[in-house]
Image: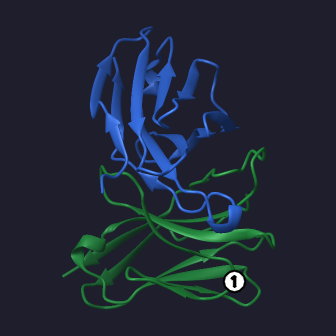
């Protein structure tokens, strides 16, 4: 699976949009971009994923550049409860038998702190 | 609907002992994965099981083993515990993608906090 690079930490004011960048310059054509977050002492929570088109759901938007070498997770109106570690992961959805089948490779993530 | 459930939530063991951690996936999910998260680091992949067969293994010693049962629940076993095995052990379940596509998003449980003393 391709490696990702994220800033170590970011701050955001409550009510403002939080834009979390991720660099994945070695991403392959069959690899998806996934975002998870982990609030202190809880299991990681799935946020969103995409291949090449921008995606939006009730939690966030995912913007993937045309060359797919980077992406941005957008939390449109950050709240204090969005304070967490955000992980950007790239992986292929391989068929059975592949060692990357279902595997998520977590890096250090970005610590997002939302302040009042 | 119930999410991924793990038991126990906390556990204290002595070096050299053996431990079994349990995971029940979301109903309908046939894939279960296990991760180890040491304090201050991201989760590290240990195993993945799909349809009761091992489909992936991370870089962990043979002291770590797992299995998946016919009801898709899973157990993670760790033998000869070391102090370094102290961590949050996470279980994740996943559905298979539409049209036979690969595994899509993973849903994590709250984890089992293992402390080895």
Q: Residue at x 47, y 65 (%)?
A: A36
Q: Residue A28: which quarter of the image?
A: bottom right
Left or right, A106 with respect to A43, comes to right
Residue A92 in sight in this render: no
Q: Residue at x 68, y 88 (%)?
A: A65
Q: Residues within 10 Å of mark 1 (few under 14, many from 20)?
A: some
Measured as percent of width and height from the top left, residue A4 is found at 65, 66
Colour of chain B as rendered = blue
| In the rendered image, the vertical position of residue B52 relative to residue A70, given as above or below | above
Q: Residue B20: which quarter of the image?
A: top left
| In the rendered image, the vertical position of residue A76 relative to residue A46, given as above or below | below
B24 or A23: nearer the viewer = B24
Colour of chain A as rendered = green
A94 or B18: nearer the viewer = A94
Residue A12 in sight in this render: yes
Q: Name the residue under label 1.
A: A52
A19 or B9: nearer the viewer = B9
Q: Which residue is drawn at 54% across and 62% down?
A: B105
Number of marks drawn: 1
Left or right, B99 with respect to B65, comes to right
């Amino acid at each position: 699976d391709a490696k990702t690079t994220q800033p170590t930490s970011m701050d955001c004011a409550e009510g403002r949009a939080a834009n979390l960048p991720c660099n994945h310059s070695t991403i392959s054509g069959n690899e998806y971009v996934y975002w998870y977050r982990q609030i202190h002492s809880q299991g990681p929570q799935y946020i969103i994923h995409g291949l090449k088109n921008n995606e939006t759901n009730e939690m966030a938007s995912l913007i993937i550049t045309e060359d797919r070498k980077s992406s941005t997770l957008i939390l449109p109106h950050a709240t204090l409860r969005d304070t967490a570690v955000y992980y950007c992961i790239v992986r292929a959805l391989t068929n059975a038998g592949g060692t990357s089948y279902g595997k998520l490779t977590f890096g250090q993530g970005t610590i997002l702190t939302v302040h009042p | 609907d119930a999410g991924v459930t793990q038991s126990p939530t906390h556990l204290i063991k002595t070096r050299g002992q053996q431990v079994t951690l349990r995971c029940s996936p979301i109903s309908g999910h046939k894939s279960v994965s296990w991760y180890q998260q040491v304090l201050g680091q991201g989760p590290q992949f240990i195993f993945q099981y799909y349809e009761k067969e091992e489909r992936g293994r991370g870089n962990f010693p043979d002291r770590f083993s797992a299995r998946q049962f016919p009801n898709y629940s899973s157990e993670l076993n760790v033998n000869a515990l070391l102090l370094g095995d102290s961590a949050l052990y996470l279980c994740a379940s996943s559905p298979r993608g539409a049209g036979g596509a690969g595994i899509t998003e993973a849903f994590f449980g709250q984890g089992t906090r293992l402390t080895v003393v």
